[in-house]
Image (cartoon, rainbow, N blue to C red):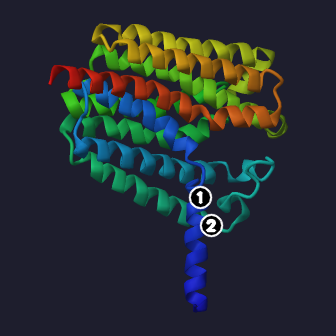
Amino acid sequence: MTATTTASRSRFSLYLDLIRWDRPAGWLVCLWPTLSALWIAADGFPGWHLLLVFVLGTFLMRSAGCCVNDVADRDFDKHVKRTAQRPVTTGAVSVKEALGLGVVLALVSFGLVLTTNTAAIAWSVPAVLVAIAYPFTKRIISMPQAVLGIAFNFGIVIAFAAVQGQVPAVAWWMWLGNMFWVLAYDTEYAMVDRDDDLKIGIKTSAITLGRLDVAAITAFYLLFLGIWAVALQPYALGAIFYIALAVALAQAVWHFTLIRTRTREGCFKAFRINHWLGATVFAGIAGSYLVRSILTN
């Protein structure tokens, strides 16, 4: 193997580190509510084309977001234990490289949206703008996790737009409910770095909520599941959906046991396993439509 090949493989490995390839939890928490919205909008399986567009698009946009985030936070990350070795922070990947990769990933994602319809394309523009703005809000907003929620929730909006050409009221109710889920898991994430963030002046929901953090996170989980239960009630999804909600609620209780002592390890584990909660809710929705399809055929 030549030195050039080794160097290029090393660079590729750094790019994979930059987009958190080995940590899928970050894009899976975006994927599950997006797919849930896609199934509701399509009244069942949306077809392979839209499924591929939204799975790949979610992964690509989250990866692009990581590039922008690491550039924006490079001077802060060096003071945080968990992020000190990120490629941009250490200088292994330059700012220009990271931004270039982010632009390429975002453009590929936009190319996927172009295969849908005008409404979805139109909604994708503010989605990108909010995703770019989010990393910089940590300096000025006490709850930047809310901005992250807006960025992540655009998948719900674009899914309805792609299927129906419009964004009905149920989409916004799902959007609101999912906002509380984002606040829950990203506050758990922020609790991991709270000590470091206080020293360097970063604003987070964990700092803003203070000793109310655990109670607030518990309330956020309950609001997420409660709003979705009420919003999707007219769709008569049946027992499978409500069983899935009960299982998700049990997971929320498990999260409480992990974060109540506020240890770094417990809070980080709670964040990392959040995608299972989202997967459970999606399974309840997709499973309900699958059973309905079987029974009516």
Residue 96 appears in the figure: no
Most foreground residue, 190 or 118: 190
Q: Residues within 10 Å of mark 1 (few under 14, many from 20)?
A: many
- Marks 1 and 2: in contact by CB < 8 Å? yes
Helix, strand or loop at mark 1 = helix
From mark 2 to mark 1, how far is it between C-alphas?
8 Å
Label 1 sits on what residue type?
Leu
Determine which quarter of the picture holds residue 180: top right
- Give the residue displayed 59% in from the left and 58% down from the top: 18
Q: Residues within 10 Å of mark 2 (few under 14, many from 20)?
A: some
- Give the residue displayed 26% in from the left and 40% down from the top: 121
Q: Quadrant of the C terminus?
A: top left
> Which mark identifies residue 18?
1
Determine which quarter of the picture holds residue 292: top left
Helix, strand or loop at mark 2 = loop
Most foreground residue, 262 or 96: 262
> Which mark identifies residue 93?
2
- Give the residue displayed 23% in from the left and 48% down from the top: 114
Label 2 sits on what residue type?
Val
Q: Earlier in the sequence, mark 2 or mark 1?
A: 1
Q: Position of residue 119 (x, y in %)?
A: 22, 33
Residue 125 appears in the figure: yes
**Foreground: disc 2 or disc 1:** 1
Determine which quarter of the picture holds residue 263: top right
Q: Position of residue 159 (x, y in %)?
A: 30, 32
Q: Position of residue 68 (x, y in %)?
A: 55, 51
Q: Position of residue 234 (x, y in %)?
A: 30, 8
Above or below, comparing residue 257 to residue 16 in the picture? above
Q: Quadrant of the N terminus?
A: bottom right
Most foreground residue, 150 or 18: 18
- Give the residue displayed 40% in from the left and 17% down from the top: 241
Most foreground residue, 204 or 255: 255
